Amino acid sequence: MTEVPTKRPATGRRKVELDPRLAAYKGVWVFIEHERGTTHPVSWELLGEARKLADQLGAEVGAVVLGEPGNAIREACHETFRYGADICYLIEDPVLASYRNEPYTVGLTHLVDKFKPEILLLGATTLGRDLGGSIATTLATGLTADCTELTIDPENRSLAATRPTFGGSLLCTIQTLNYRPQMATVRPRVMHMPERGSPRSGRLIEETLGVIEESIITKVLEYIPDEQQDQAQLAYADIIVSGGRGLKRPENFQLIWDLAKVLGAEVGATRPLIQAGWVSADRQVGQTGKTVRPKLYIAAGISGAIQHRVGMESSDVIIAINEDPNAQIFDFATYGIVGNAMQILPALTDAFRIYGATARRAG
Amino acid sequence: MHIVVCIKQVPDSAQIRVHPVSNTIMRQGVPAIVNPYDLFALEEALRLKDRYGGRVTVLCMGPSQADAALRKALSFGADEAILLSDRAFAGSDTLATSYALAAAIQRIHVDMPVDLVFAGKQTIDGDTAQVGPGIAKRLNLQLLTYVSKIDALDLDRKEIVIHRRAEGGVQVLKTRLPCLVTVLEGINEMRFATMDDMFRAARHPLEVWDKVAAGIEDLSKIGLKGSPTVVAKVFAPHPKARKAERIEVHGDAPKDLVATLLTKLFTHHPQLEREIAARLA
Amino acid sequence: MSEQFDVIVIGAGPSGNAAAYTAAKAGMKVLQIERGESPGSKNVQGAILYSDALEKIIPDFRDDAPLERHLIEQRMWMLDDDSYVGSTYRSQAFNSPPYNRYTIIRAQFDKWFSKRVQDAGALTICETTVLGLHMDGDRVVGVKTDRVGGSVYADAVILADGVNSLLAKKAGFHAELQPRDVALAVKEIHFMPDTTIESRFNVGPQEGVAIEMAGKITQGMVGTGFLYTNAESLTIGVGCLLSDLRAQKITPHQLIEKMKEHPAIRPLLEGGEMKEYCAHLIPEGGYNAIPTISGAGWLMVGDAGMFVNSVHREGSNLAMTTGRLAAETLIELRAAGKDFTAANLARYRSKLDDSFVMKDLKKYRGMPGFLEKNPQFFTQYPELINRAAHTMLLVDGADKKSKERDIRQHFIRKRSRRGLIGDAFKFWRAFE
């Protein structure tokens, strides 16, 4: 972990002459997270960013796809071109069917060593972080995690990755000057989903893995998919109703569920509620939980402290309900009601219900 | 069985104070705690020790005041505590950190073979989750991250079966020991240290290893020199320009407040209204 | 769990550390219990370190204690809204080692002090709260903590648990803390380069200045402010009697915000980055508020015993001294083979009486009452004094005699002749 609060900034005025070996690294790559026939949307978000970075560098965008052979993976390759990739590097092999650190590390390392990208981006999912940490160590290069902004430093054409630090209250910009590739992970939903363009052609480069199942030490015994109704699908929800400590008692959280049900919304919560066991950990919105950017975020009894704020402030519309007129959340919400959430939430639920009934009759 | 648990002392970001008037973040005076995620790892290791016997060694890389973190780990029941501390480590990013920790674990392994290395899923100050994977790579250990459950451990056959959280589901993985495990929060509930434990922890001699004691030979791989990433700048996030539009109604009855809110909401956000109407239908 | 100790010290602030260190150094088996995450984590202070008090405990503290600047200059300001009348004492005598007072940063200092305590042989545990005292009749025989197996027994218990000692209250050693016996103070630390501090305050490297302030900054309430120079930061703070704050419905945050805007103060803070902010209670009741401080098997030290000289803003030296004297009491009795009975432990009080601690507190025993009954010293005199100075220093063609008359008449108008004489007399008496 870069010790940000105590370390003095080391760059700025230093003009870096890139070692010619490293100057040979060109291209902005995105690791496409493809498993069990589907591609994680964060891959497209990253392709959008990669396109912007590549345009600034005058470089090409490469998409890296690893997985088991079949139609789904070929489809995914075509999709990468639609989202802006110029080249798609594909390794398909049965041993890559379910993510395991060893074969994926071998595959990605091989591609990087052979085709030398200057930037490699991965989604900060459990897979991306697992793989990213291994790859960065194998390649002995720099990796900046959970970035909120990626730009190119015009002075030295290197990646400037900005991420939160000190609990989210400050931001820092990190660069990997003398090592390649420059790696970064980005959480789902932090970058915009780009336009899915019309089908276009791109170059497909296929490589082989060269690893047999017998040599892989970790075995996948089973994959247990999450129950649809139990598991939260927060990251890509369009409407989220969220509760915080201002709800005072666990019984009151039911009011959040009620409102969410009427709106067909997802339910979220702040970290203290997770730690107190009111809801499962996958519903945590915030710096150490999920980043969300729904069309509507309703925050009840939430103070708006920075740890939660960074997880939801990009929502299109934020409605805040809090008893404390000085609560921080009123500094960045769209609409604010100063009042008792235990009264406002049921009123809101009723109002939406009535509105729904009216809309049905009218429509 | 011998488990090494890696812990880190971090500033308690939950206790960061905001100045009541100026709203600036107070960076000093934040108490240091053991990285909360590491405590789950420690508890998991202690539970395995309860079940299978053996020893738990806690390893922490940090400045001299990180000894408080180690004493806390000892108070929960760890058998040995090693502080990896050297000025040369200053300025280490995750690559340099994993190098130093891997070297230290290698040293520990020489004295007493290590079966498992545990760590928390990430730190609350760095949040990168990179050091665990980094250590595994360097020591050639199988890497199991985001572990939500340890299903089975067979010390004779040197095999472990775990549940690993993936997007949308759980992988059940089996691998060989030794391996490195990072655990998810909530995997267990931390035990409480008794008074006896506190005394034992306070009295326990801490081992402090500098780079030489840890067997680190390549100095270019530690500290600033060994850190590919550099911090270009640190700054405060731009405060959002807009403030919330307060819904205030004379009389302030919830029903009226809500009615006003919905009116405004639907008037200014017709797209959202359509979205909601569609869901309510 | 029945490990027996000679002494249990509750608290790891300056008084607790002083007591634990002294006792451990003399070979006693000492357990120190702190409820915060680390020693000093619950402590807040200005902060000034008084060498004299610490030298008597750790003579070589200067070798490695984290010290900010040694004070060579003391300024005392009486502030009006946008002016102040002040006096300064600066001396080269204060600039030759060994230095008499230093500014310190408590977080680092407490860590250092605690390490010394543990090196001396005391066992220090943190994150453990003492819930109550174990009694055998009237005698304290141990403590009960919030941990499993958390009862520990000792021959003596030293209560060093701070200004709001709930423990002492619970055990009936003293009554509920009165709002008029405590002040609520806030402080901020502003960081800036050492060279800026040195040029602004006219000192060299490692030299420091302390400014003690009174007047309009407390808006008529009983209280004081301060500004200290640390190595790379300034500490600024203000505090008022809790009873006054409550009556006026003003918060200390509001006071410090206004104070920072004062035209004499704002330039001193210019360019600084505020990085720390905290608040704490300070004992103000003085001599009359001191509770029972000893009994069978127990002694009370530091803020818990209300040992603060509010007139001179001295607290940490009294804390360390009372801690040391308490430990010395136990050591002497033990050496003489005597038991820790209430009668024997009363020796602690005699030691305090013989020292500057009680002597100073006794001297100023009338001060709290005096200030309570004479608000004019905070409501009127700052303005009167400043105005007088202004009148005298303004060269506007008026002759000096007229000016003097003007000042005199203004004083009389505001305070009446009788009032003035009374003020002078009472003021003299309060300091006697």
Image (cartoon, grey):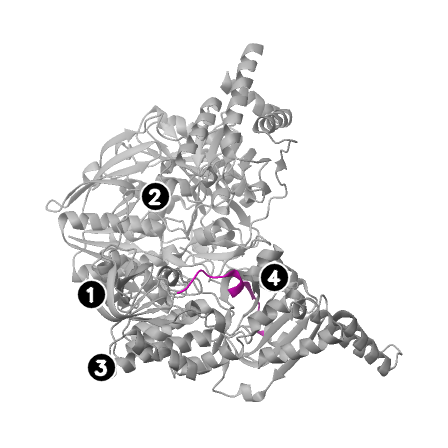
Q: CA distance from mark 4 to mark 1?
A: 48 Å
In the rendered structure, which amino acid carries the disc numbered 3? Gly
Task: Say yes or no: labels 3 and 1 on the same chain.
Answer: yes
Label 3 belongs to which residue? Answer: C337
In 3D space, how far apart are the residues under numbered discs 3 and 4 (Cα atoms)? 53 Å
Q: Position of residue B153 (x, y in %)?
A: 16, 43
Does label 1 lie on the same chain as label 2?
A: no
Q: Earlier in the sequence, mark 4 or mark 1?
A: 1
Q: Which residue is mark 1?
A: C3
Q: CA distance from mark 3 to mark 2?
A: 70 Å
Q: Are marks 3 and 4 in contact (CB under 8 Å)?
A: no
Can residue A193 be seen here? The reply is: no
Q: Chain of mark 2?
A: A
Distance of label 3 from label 1 (alpha carbons): 22 Å
Disc 4 sits on a residue from what chain?
C
Q: Residue lying farthest right?
A: C397
Could you tell me which residue is drawn at 15 percent across and 54 percent down?
B54
Closer to the observer: label 4 or label 1? 1
Q: Is residue A134 left or right of residue B15?
A: left
Amino acid marked by disc 4: Ile
Q: Which residues are magenta?
A: C174-195
Labels 2, 4: one chain: no
User: Mark 3, mark 1: which one is toward the viewer?
Assistant: 3
- Which quarter of the figure has residue C409? bottom right
* In contact (CB < 8 Å): disc 2 and disc 4: no
Residue position for label 2: A131
The subunit letter for the residue under badge 1 reads C
Residue under the point 59% across and 48% down: B238
Crowding near pointer 4: few (<14 within 10 Å), some, many (20+)?
Answer: many
Alpha carbons under labels 2 and 4: distance apart? 51 Å
